[in-house]
Amino acid sequence: MTAKLFSPATDEAVRECSEIIKSGGNVVFPTETVYGLGANALDPKAVDGIFKAKGRPSDNPLIVHLAYPEDAEKYAYTNEKYYALAKAFMPGPLTVILKKREIIPDNVTCGLDTVGLRVPSNPIAHRLIELSGVPIAAPSANKSGRPSPTEYAHVVEDMGSDAGAILDGGESEIGVESTVIRLTDGGVEILRPGRVSPEDLENAGFKVTVNKGVTHPVANDEKVASPGMKYRHYAPKAKVVILDGERTKVIERMKAEYKNGCGILCFEEDAEEFGKTNVQTFGRERDAVSQAKRLFDSLRAFDGSDVKIIYSRMPDSNGVGLAVTNRLLRAAGFAVEKI
Ligand code: TXA
Ligand code: MG
């Protein structure tokens, strides 16, 4: 363990961590979505440290976190639509891709001429950015490929040996990463779904399209709108297979696989159909918000068992369910069996 641990994250601890950021180090901090691994976005060496600590591919750009929506002026070319989005959703779980200004180092954006900007609502995240006095580049604080961390124990496990410090902010409120959008001629395009759903964006007056990569696999050599789409993500050690079909039939199949020693990832209402071991639930069947909050923790929990295959129920993909479906599909490497 080399990371300085701050549990709980007192104001004094946040202040000490802001000094670490200022001096070029990195800090794991809570946000309302998932934990992030942050460093000074204007310091290419500090940014490089993030890629090393995570084992992140060098072509997957980082989101830059700001204390206030107006700070975007300094780092990107904004427009009316950005401010309309900011008014509706910031601070909060939305990342907007804009054309970047020169001041943002190339390794933050991996050579792209755009940058993702987000203003987190979590008070610890906000205070850390404000005290640091710089924008904070931060990916999710997991080792590359693993489920994003939604609890203090997850970040200690993944980053305890590699981060400069870790701030304990308890359980993440939302549980899946921010909605990533880019601006299109007519409206916005979702590159990664999150707690800000297509419906939320539409209700705020934006015409919404969803990039195909959100629900479909992309080939390795295909040009993608967001580099994150290329990688297998959120994966526990065991293989995940999603079963899609009518509840009774899916449960019947799951019971048979459970007898063979497979893991079960199901909704709370289904749990009584199975025993106590090798079974994890992710929220309630008709409540995507509860599913988002539980999914990554449940995927991680399987790493403590020796199951080789996990059978999961397919969530509904409406509203926030699009984010849950997207993460589960990626965890499964798009392995879906229709029943
Ligand atoms: O909720 C979140 O967004 C969390 C917390 C810590 O803020 N952060 C997060 O970062 O999820 P990360 O690095 O795990 O995911 C960033 C995603 C990746 O899929 C990346 O490809 C995409 O955003 N992205 C970043 N900059 C981009 C850009 N300029 N153009 C397209 N996609 C971009
Ligand atoms: Mg991530």
Image (tube, helix red, strand yellow):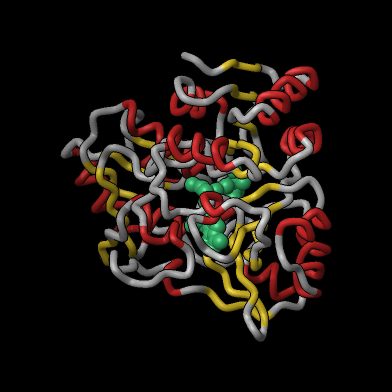
x then y, percent, for residue 177: 57, 50
The residue located at (80%, 53%) in the rendering is 71
| Residue drawn at (38%, 48%) of the image | 57
| In the foreground, 172 or 101 | 101
Q: Quadrant of residue 231 in the image?
A: bottom left
Can residue 292 be spotted in the picture? no
Q: Nearest the camera: 291 or 333?
A: 333
Seen from this angle, which residue lies furthest bottom? 186
Coordinates of residue 95 in the picture (x, y in percent): 65, 58
Q: Name which quarter of the figure residue 202 lies in.
A: bottom right
Q: Horizontally, is 263 left or right of 6 in the view? A: left
Q: Residue at position x 74%, y 41% from top?
A: 134
Percent x, y for residue 48? 50, 39
Q: Nearer the viewer, residue 155 or 162?
A: 162
Q: Specify whether residue 311 is in view.
A: yes
Residue nearer the viewer, 238 or 87: 87
Query: Residue extending furthest front?
Result: 102
Q: Residue 195 is drawn in which quadrant?
A: bottom right
Tell me residue 111's x, y (percent): 49, 59
Q: In the rendered picture of this protein, how many numbered marks are placed on residues?
A: 0
- The quadrant of the rendering that contains the C terminus is bottom left
Asked if 301 appears above or below 189 in the picture, the reply is: above
Q: Residue at x 76, y 74 (%)?
A: 81
